[in-house]
Image (spheres, rainbow, N blue to C red):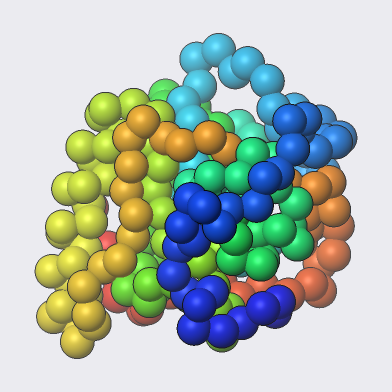
Amino acid sequence: MLGVGAWKQRLPREADLLPGRGQPLPLHNVHHVHGRPLRGEFPGMEVVDVGLGCFWGAERKFWNLPGVHTTAVGYAGGGTPNPTYEEVCSGQTGHTEAVRVVYDPAQLDFATLLKAFWESHDPTQGMRQGNDVGTQYRSALYCHTQAQYDAALASRDAYQESLQASGYPPITTEIAYPAPAFFYAEDYHQQYLSKNPNGYCGLGGTGVSCAI
């Protein structure tokens, strides 16, 4: 974990943002699990960007969901264009580690995707997820349609009731529409746990069921 400290648990001021770069990071545009593209046009598909802690384990959760066409990891919700992993970990880009989920709405209902999102992490922890501390581990739902946004807000309110009944504090998940810019992460992060089956996965839920 890089640069852990109290200052790293709050979003940077605009004046403190790193400048980034004008060009995207290089990307091998082939999914390591199924061979489909990570980036491009996906006719008939819908897209949502989710943050639920370290994106290595989070991406595997979603590529295994039936109806998901492809996934990729990247950085979203910040102010630095095309950041590197090291820059995001510095706390000076404002990004969270995110997973882009491209799914077929005819095969996967958005409510099912939301249920997987809420139950796969603890959305009440603010700028951390378990032992992973920093702004890049915050919970986020970045929606690409108004319908997704409305469903996300409704699911948050419903899950909040269940969490509160189990003694959890309020949900801190950032929910936004339109979705902010998504910058694809370096190749070695893409489908990391497929390339490194014994790699680190800090993904863990609360154990509270999300009744959607």
User: Residue 1, position in %: x, y?
Assistant: 70, 79
**Quarter holding residue 10:** bottom left
Report the residue at 55% width, 57% height from top.
16
Q: Would residue 21 appear left or right of 48 to someone viewing this image?
A: right
Q: Would residue 164 appear left or right of 65 to someone viewing this image?
A: left
Q: Is residue 53 visible?
A: no
User: Residue 153, position in %: x, y?
Assistant: 21, 47
User: Residue 84, position in %: x, y?
Assistant: 75, 51
Q: Nearer the viewer, residue 176 or 87?
A: 87
155 w.r.t. 137: above or below: above
Q: Is residue 179 visible?
A: yes
User: Residue 162, position in %: x, y?
Assistant: 17, 71
205 w.r.t. 113: above or below: below
**Quarter holding residue 163:** bottom left
Report the residue at 23% width, 56% height from top.
156
Q: Nearer the viewer, residue 137 or 3?
A: 3
Residue positioned most to the front:
15
Q: Nearer the viewer, residue 16 or 165?
A: 16
Residue positioned most to the top:
43
**Quarter holding residue 164:** bottom left
Q: Would residue 4 appear left or right of 107 to someone viewing this image?
A: right
Report the residue at 66% width, 73% height from top.
201
Report the residue at 77% width, 30% height from top.
23
68 w.r.t. 17: above or below: above
Across the whole image, how many numbered discs are drawn on residues?
A: 0
Q: Would residue 106 appear left or right of 65 to someone viewing this image?
A: left
